[in-house]
Image (cartoon, rainbow, N blue to C red):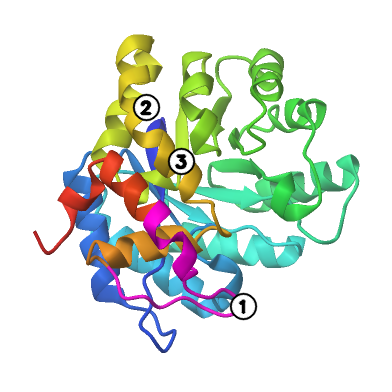
Amino acid sequence: MMFQGSMVAIVTPMRMDGTLDEKSLFDLVEWHIASQTDAIIVAGTTGESVTLTTQEQMDVIAAVVKQVNKRIPVIAGTGSNSTQHAIELTLNAKKAGADACLIVTPYYNKPTQNGMYEHYKTIAETCDIPIILYNVPGRTSCDLLPETVERLAKISNIIGIKEATGNLERAKEILKRCGKNFMVYSGDDATAMDLMLNGAKGTISVTANVAPLKMHELCDAAIKGDKALADSINADLMPLHKNLFLEANPIPVKWALYEMGWISSGIRLPLLPLDQKFHDDVRAAMQTAGALELSQSE
């Protein structure tokens, strides 16, 4: 199965007391499918995976798989800084029916390049499911280098990477090293268009939570090489690309979806709702993108 286009890193809706809100999650899934989102990534960074229990993570993945019902691909976040725990999460995701798994580099431990290679190799050999690597050194304190990605790309079920450094030259090097059968996805909305124009197959997006149809249209244009159309759409989205990171993701995006009426304002400690001083900036970005016109209440 080919995964490409606008792949939303979906939020995990929560009530004010922090419990999971399955009804809002189902509503979001239906909105994304209606808005031509190309794939859903569940229980990733934006989905607050690090504060979900293992059982909650399994439940959220299974719920999204069931709701989507094979209409678009579902990719499960199953990363951990423990190889054995990552294997457990990945096997659970496969059992739930996920189409692939997105596995972040082992955060906090600071493994060597060989350690990361063995981590992913062990998961891939134990779990018979397509695996997408996820490199985000700004969060993890480790950096999966292009030469290590090239080694991992030779493992048959490691099919691609979410490269979230925002470094276009880095991503181009991975594209060159790993060949056309290895999928490179942007993990940085602000540079996603440029990366897709240079051969990436899509973006795993935070912005797509708030403006799903426009992100689909942007990805479609960029992948087809229509730079003029991509530039025009991206200009409307750029304030969102930037302002959804005024505080740590997913704080601003959850506030935006709350403002649109899609979810309640629940978020889990140690994260707090968006600081009041950023409300106007995020709201202005939503208006530029036409996102407030997409609110559930209208």
Residue 275 point in image, percent of width and height: 50, 69
Q: Which residue is at a point 36% across and 75% down the rendered structure image?
A: 265
Is 105 in front, or is 167?
A: 167
Q: Is residue 11 visible?
A: no
Query: Which range is magenta?
Result: 263-281
Q: Which residue is at a point 41% across and 89% down the rendered structure image?
A: 17
Residue 241, which numbered label? 3
Binning the other alpha carbons within 10 Å of mark 2 as few (below 14), some (14 to 19) or many (20 upward) gives few
Q: Which residue is at a point 46% across and 34% down the rendered structure image?
A: 203
State the residue position of label 1.
Answer: 270
Dot 2 or dot 3, earlier in sequence: 2
Query: Element type at marker 2?
Result: helix
Binning the other alpha carbons within 10 Å of mark 1 as few (below 14), some (14 to 19) or many (20 upward) gives few
Check the picture and name the quadrant holding the N terminus. Answer: top left
Residue 73 point in image, percent of width and height: 35, 44
Residue 235, which numbered label? 2
**What amino acid is labelled 2 in the image?**
Ala
Is 184 in front, or is 240?
A: 240
Residue 165 point in image, percent of width and height: 67, 36
Residue 157 point in image, percent of width and height: 59, 37
**What amino acid is labelled 1 in the image?**
Pro
Magenta span dominant secondary structure? loop
Q: Which residue is at a point 78% across and 50% down the rendered structure image?
A: 119
Query: Would residue 22 be counted in the magenta stretch?
Result: no
Q: CA distance from mark 3 to mark 1?
A: 23 Å
Dot 2 or dot 1, earlier in sequence: 2
Check the picture and name the quadrant holding the C terminus. Answer: bottom left
Q: Are marks 2 and 3 in contact (CB under 8 Å)?
A: no
**What amino acid is labelled 3 in the image?**
His
